[in-house]
Amino acid sequence: MMILNLHRQGLSITAIARRTGRDPKTVRKYISRGLELPAYGPRQVGRPGKLAPFLDYLRERIAACPHLTATRLTREIRERGYAGAYTAVKRFVAAIRPDSGPKPSAGQQAQVDFARFVTEFTSPV
């Protein structure tokens, strides 16, 4: 609104830009728009990622062998033409890998007693 008011008062685009601290191209853009509010819409869905053609293959491999590492799966799909990053494969595999539950511990039980013992030696050595 301020840019439009200054323009109606007859100030040049450069003068308005100096006064508002905006770039002259920005001032020109808002003057050409008039009172129209900026229109923000939903983001466009971008192109499919590099991993998209290999998603079905990765799902099949994880379903058959859930213990396979992302490193090995990356190597396998690179042989099939994948040119993307390892981290994309790692994120996808972590998302679809079945939850194996809590990891087993090494021992069954451990107990510790904290006590103080004082020993006095009475005979000289």
Image (cartoon, rainbow, N blue to C red):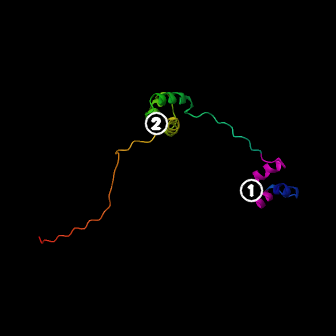
Q: Quadrant of residue 12?
A: bottom right
**Label whose residue precedes the other's in the sequence (1 or 2):** 1
Residue 36, position as x, y percentages in the image: 82, 47
Quadrant where the C terminus is found in the figure: bottom left
Q: Quadrant of residue 23?
A: bottom right
Q: Is 116 displayed left or right of 38 in the figure?
A: left
Name above or below for residue 67 compared with residue 114: above
Mark 2, residue position: 70
The kind of residue tagged 2 is Ala
Name above or below for residue 79 compared with residue 108: above
Q: Element at badge 1? A: loop
Camera-side residue of 97 and 40: 97
Residue 101, position as x, y percentages in the image: 46, 39
- Prevailing secondary structure class for the magenta stretch in the rendered image: helix
Region of the chain picked out in magenta, as a range: 14-38
Residue drawn at (20%, 70%) of the image: 120
Camera-side residue of 84 and 69: 69
